[in-house]
Image: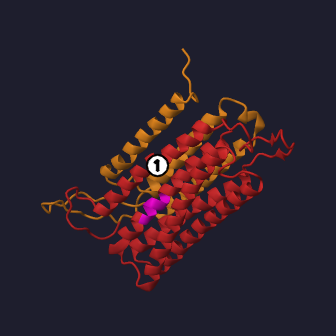
Amino acid sequence: MGGEHPPTSTGLNNTKVAIWAFIGSECFFFASLISTYLIYRGRSPVGPFPHDAWTDPATGHVFKAILNIPVTSVSTFVLLMSSLAMVLAHSAVVRGDRRSSKIWLASTAILGATFLGFQAYEFTSFVHEGLTIHTNLFGSSFFILTGFHGAHVTAGVIWLLTLLFIDIKRGFSPDEAINVDVCALYWHFVDVVWIAIFTLVYLIK
Amino acid sequence: MAADHSHATLSHDAEGNVSPPEHTHPDWGTYKWVALILTVLTAMEVWIYYIPSFTKTYLFVPTLLILSAVKFTIVVMFYMHLKYDAKLFRALFVGPLTLAAFTLVGLLFLFGHLKISF
């Protein structure tokens, strides 16, 4: 972690205790959203559907399976690589390597923004193909779940850009590595939530 | 996967007593291997999704869930440093995660998505 912290009753850094407690509460938040998605799974009376084609009986229009697995696989890879960049950024700050810390913080933010770009593309293409948040139960639960995850990624990117700004402006000393550490923990949590979403929503038919 | 890049800190309790180091962090080699393993596991997940004969078997869903759980655990243990960190942090994460998982499974039973037949 780098640096000492003031005495605490647990002997641990309070900031880190707080971020872990927050992450614990986020487990419940995402579990409730994933539960909702799974409960409504396969209960939409009308399409479009995630994995199967559907013909609208009123118009005869054929809707193909809506999920684009190749595109989402690439965005999943991008998010996994952003986690690697994040640990390298933290490691650089701990070592006092200011040049590397800037490069890896910027890389993490760029990869996070790229993931958001993929999500924007996915959402836009879904709307063009006839799936909105109002269309059916799948649309509602899907957009709410992935939308909230995207909001968390957005918050993470803003946090990373703030850290990058500070790093460029005055730099982080190894004693201040806790500031990057808590952001890294949040970022990795967002990554593990996506690992669960990718399997439960995209891959399991 | 040795944790040879140590930068643990000595912390102090309210009385000023020195506690054991909070944690050590893995090195670049470990992070590289973790990234490679995560990539391979993700590729495996996507690969089996495209095997029609496998997706129709009862093994499809458990295999995906196991691969996902392994990826989840690897990120938490190595990238989030829970393997090397204080037990309190582990409790703060694993406790709510376990409770959330039980709640999720309970809801799936309640709404008829999971059934136990006797």
Picture colour for chain A: red
**Residue displayed at 67% across by 36% down:** A42
The picture places residue B35, in percent across and down from the top left corner, at 56, 58
Q: Is residue A53 above or below residue B17?
A: above
**Residue B65 in sight from this viewpoint:** yes
Per the image, label 1 sits on a secondary structure element best described as: helix
Q: Is residue B84 above or below residue B54?
A: below
Q: Quadrant of residue A149?
A: bottom right
The picture places residue A158, in percent across and down from the top left corner, at 50, 70
| Nearest to the observer: residue A31 or residue B94 | A31
In the displayed image of the protein, which residue is found farthest to the right? A60
**Residue displayed at 49% across by 48% down:** A30
In the picture, the quarter occupied by the C terminus of chain B is: top right
The picture places residue A86, in percent across and down from the top left corner, at 50, 66
The picture places residue A135, in percent across and down from the top left corner, at 69, 47
Residue A187 part of the magenta segment: yes
Q: Could you tell whether B26 is left or right of A134 in the image?
A: left
| Residue at mark 1 | A29
Q: Could you tell whether B78 is left or right of A108 in the image?
A: left
Q: Write down the region rendered in magenta.
A: A183-188
Picture colour for chain B: orange
**Residue displayed at 43% across by 65% down:** A183
**Residue displayed at 25% across by 68% down:** A5
Q: Main secondary structure of the magenta part?
A: helix
Q: Residues within 10 Å of mark 1 (few under 14, many from 20)?
A: few
